[in-house]
């Protein structure tokens, strides 16, 4: 089947670049046509690769031009990043793409991986780290440095093979080296290839003949990702997501369908899509994106949705600026930018109306505009594109929530050093512990925690969710869940106590907690509530025990520290008992217990 | 039949030369810059434009306009 290339070449070059189906020849013609117009390059990227990736330059220029950036591309020498650094710096390169490639370790490394001993893999990892550490240090002056991960080219083996394990280790090493530098981002090439599809991503003919493994589809995705990670080569920095309400946050029109009629139920389509969309927006907010509303609606009705609708994920505190009124959206967007004191080019606008989108596009071309597609399943791809805009350039490619957690912990640690005593520090955290008894909604998470907790787990009984539910329903048992929060955030359900009742004796069958919340006294603060409940059920004595495992030594003396007398020890199993009337909990005045 | 105008256009785009320079006797010997890298791009571009897959044994060999035309004629099913 012939494609009429000559005809399509009559299109405007930018139209050709924007056409996902444009062929290589068309792209070359279009890029060259645009670049024939004299205009200074706005950015300069250097590509230093361990494979032949010359054609990547075409796609880098394509996506840069589509984002309005004239990009110069310099190709480095084959597998010579240190030499390239010097040459690129001399040439005025400001962004750097570094691509280690497996076969540069030794030929056919994919096959070799299966033969490597542990010691050889250690040596590989050490060498890889050493080499790229040096390169990344030398690259400190470049604006953005993208370090690409290693990936397989051959089909994966079901269940994984040794190559997967080797790659995971080497990529982890590269990630860690990248994370040590503020200007370096890790780009997961395996993900990129998976997104394209392995068969589309690689061309084995040119891989084997010319060490040029990448097919156009992968090069195109790689270039698009590079644009995102460099935030269009430093030309944009999106900060706020401005959301319409009707058919954007929920399905339907609030003014017509009323709060009871809009589609937002997580359990039924299409409400589930909007519920999911809100969840994605909330996740963006948690990662630092400013969420705003811009909607032609009755402000009171929208506020009521935010405050009271049971299926809303977004709540008033998540929205930093609201323009809910009947005036022009262009004016409203201007007002939002003024309120937040950011440029219009920091705004991303999402609306379901083609009319509104077009009005904003034409009158505020600085604003990035996305339209909610008419068909809900297409919405997910639009959200993914929005996420890319905000997140691709962010430092944390490695689980932003985790980074957030580390950041919080680092902040907490920094504060710890300025307090006179540990108690002062703990008091400053504003700790709250919420105890819930026999709450079936929490059974799944409780079971999951019982499966995962090893270190602070006194008896290491593993429960399945139905067992937890049965215990909750059993009048002779109580299941307590412990949720911890502080002013830095909520740690969620992180502790569990299972109590069995028999006559006058209450037995602590299980006590386990996530190590994330230990060291703050939470493990001591919960007992007055648990024991008061036991007393109310007629218990007069409490028994507890510690069973040693390979991993729970840190909890061995917990009941001693709680003040329970040890009554016996056999094979490491320590048994405790105390009369309820005699129990006095160690004080933890810095914790507020909610039951 | 192969659209020769289209073929010339594609070769010229990929090699970065004016389309007039692609005559019947054009080859990697006569056109400066028709190196192994450009040739690889040319093969990919021909495949995309004509909707064919050029077998590996031909891909490296078709370094002249005449050879490209012969191979494409065989591959394109009218």
Image: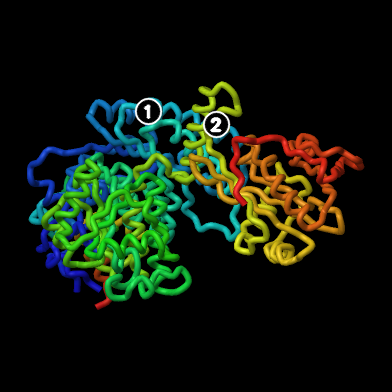
- Residue drawn 24% across and 56% down? A349
- Residue drawn 39% across and 59% down? A307
Q: For residue A159, what is the image quadrant?
A: bottom right
- Residue drawn 18% across and 63% down? A326
Q: Where is residue A85 in the image (x, y as percent from the top left)?
A: 33, 29
Q: For residue A549, what is the image quadrant?
A: top right
- Are tags 1 and 2 found on a single chain? yes
- A427 or A48: nearer the viewer: A427
Q: Where is residue A517 in the image (x, y as percent from the top left)?
A: 61, 41
Report the residue marked by disc 2.
A126
- Residue drawn 64% across and 35% down? A519
Chain hosting mark 1 = A
Question: How many neighbours does mark 2 have within 10 angstroms: few (below 14), some (14-19), or many (20 or more)?
Answer: few
Q: Give the left or right position of residue A553, taking residue A45 as reference.
A: right
Label 1, label 2: how far apart the Cα atoms are? 18 Å
Q: Where is residue A557 in the image (x, y as percent from the top left)?
A: 79, 36
Q: Is mark 1 on a helix, strand or loop?
A: helix
Work out whether A5 lies above or below A415. Answer: below
Q: What element carries label 2?
A: helix
Chain hosting mark 2 = A
Report the residue marked by disc 1.
A82
Q: Which quarter of the figure is the N terminus of chain A placed in? A: bottom left
- A109 or B76: nearer the viewer: A109
Q: For residue A3, what is the image quadrant?
A: bottom left
Earlier along the polypeptide chain: callout 1 or callout 2? 1
Q: Position of residue A209 (x, y in %)?
A: 39, 50
Colouring: rainbow
What is the count of numbered marks?
Answer: 2
Q: Give the left or right position of residue A6, taking residue A538 as reference.
A: left
Q: Is residue A505 visible?
A: yes
């Amino acid at each position: 089947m012939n494609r009429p290339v000559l005809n399509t070449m009559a299109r405007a070059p930018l139209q050709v670049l924007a056409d996902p189906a444009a062929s290589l020849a068309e792209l070359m013609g279009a890029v060259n046509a645009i670049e024939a117009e004299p205009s200074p390059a706005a950015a300069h990227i250097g590509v230093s690769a361990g494979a032949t990736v010359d054609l990547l330059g075409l796609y880098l220029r394509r996506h840069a031009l589509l984002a309005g950036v004239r990009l110069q591309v310099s190709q480095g020498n084959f597998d010579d990043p240190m030499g390239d650094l010097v040459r690129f710096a001399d040439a005025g390169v400001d962004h750097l793409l570094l691509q280690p490639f497996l076969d540069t370790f030794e030929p056919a490394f994919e096959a070799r991986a299966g033969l490597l001993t542990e010691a050889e893999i250690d040596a590989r990892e050490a060498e890889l780290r050493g080499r790229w550490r040096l390169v990344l240090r030398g690259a400190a002056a470049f604006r953005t440095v993208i370090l690409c991960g290693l990936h397989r080219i051959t089909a994966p083996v079901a269940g994984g093979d040794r190559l997967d394990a080797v790659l995971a280790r080497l990529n982890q090493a590269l990630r860690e080296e990248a994370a040590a530098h503020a200007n370096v981002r890790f780009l997961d090439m395996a993900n990129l290839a998976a997104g394209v599809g392995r068969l589309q991503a690689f061309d084995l003919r040119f891989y084997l003949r010319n060490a040029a493994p990448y097919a156009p589809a992968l090069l195109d995705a790689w270039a698009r990702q590079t644009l995102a990670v460099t935030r269009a080569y430093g030309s944009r920095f999106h900060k706020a997501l401005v959301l319409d309400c009707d058919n954007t946050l929920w399905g339907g029109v609030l003014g017509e369908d009323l709060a009871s009629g809009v589609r937002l139920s997580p359990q039924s389509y299409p409400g589930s899509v909007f519920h999911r969309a809100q969840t994605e927006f909330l996740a963006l907010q948690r990662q630092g994106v400013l969420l705003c509303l811009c909607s032609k609606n009755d402000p009171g009705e929208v506020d009521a949705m935010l405050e009271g609708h049971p299926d809303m994920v977004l709540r008033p505190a998540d929205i930093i600026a609201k323009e809910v009124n009947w005036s022009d959206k262009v004016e409203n967007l201007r007002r939002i930018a003024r309120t937040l004191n950011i440029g219009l080019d920091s705004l991303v606008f999402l609306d379901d109306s083609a009319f509104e989108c077009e009005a904003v596009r034409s009158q505020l071309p600085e604003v990035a505009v996305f339209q909610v597609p008419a068909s809900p399943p297409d919405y997910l791809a639009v959200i993914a594109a929005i996420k890319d805009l905000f997140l691709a350039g962010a430092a944390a490619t490695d689980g932003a929530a985790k980074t957030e957690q580390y950041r919080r912990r680092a902040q907490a640690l920094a504060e710890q050093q300025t307090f006179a005593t540990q108690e002062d520090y703990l008091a400053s955290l504003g700790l709250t512990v919420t105890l819930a008894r026999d709450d079936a909604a929490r059974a799944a998470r409780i079971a999951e925690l019982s499966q995962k907790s090893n270190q602070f787990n006194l008896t290491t009984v593993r429960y399945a969710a139905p067992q937890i539910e049965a215990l909750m329903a059993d009048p002779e048992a109580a299941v307590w869940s412990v949720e911890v929060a502080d002013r830095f955030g909520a740690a969620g359900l992180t502790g569990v106590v299972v109590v069995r009742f028999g006559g006058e004796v209450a037995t602590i069958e299980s006590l386990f907690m996530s190590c994330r919340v230990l060291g703050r006294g939470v493990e001591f603060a919960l007992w007055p509530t648990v024991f008061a409940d036991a007393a109310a059920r007629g218990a007069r004595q409490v028994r507890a025990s510690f069973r040693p495992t390979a991993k729970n030594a840190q909890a061995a003396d917990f009941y001693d520290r709680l003040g329970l007398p040890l009554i016996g020890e056999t094979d490491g199993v320590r048994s405790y008992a105390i009369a309820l009337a005699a129990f006095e909990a160690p004080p933890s005045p810095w914790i507020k217990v909610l039951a | 039949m192969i659209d020769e105008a289209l073929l010339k256009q594609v070769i010229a785009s990929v090699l970065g030369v004016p389309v007039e320079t692609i005559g019947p006797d054009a080859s990697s010997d006569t056109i400066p810059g028709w190196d192994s890298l450009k040739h690889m791009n040319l093969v990919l571009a021909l495949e995309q434009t004509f909707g064919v897959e050029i077998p590996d044994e031909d891909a490296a060999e078709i370094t002249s306009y005449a050879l490209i035309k012969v191979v494409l004629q065989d591959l394109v099913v009218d």
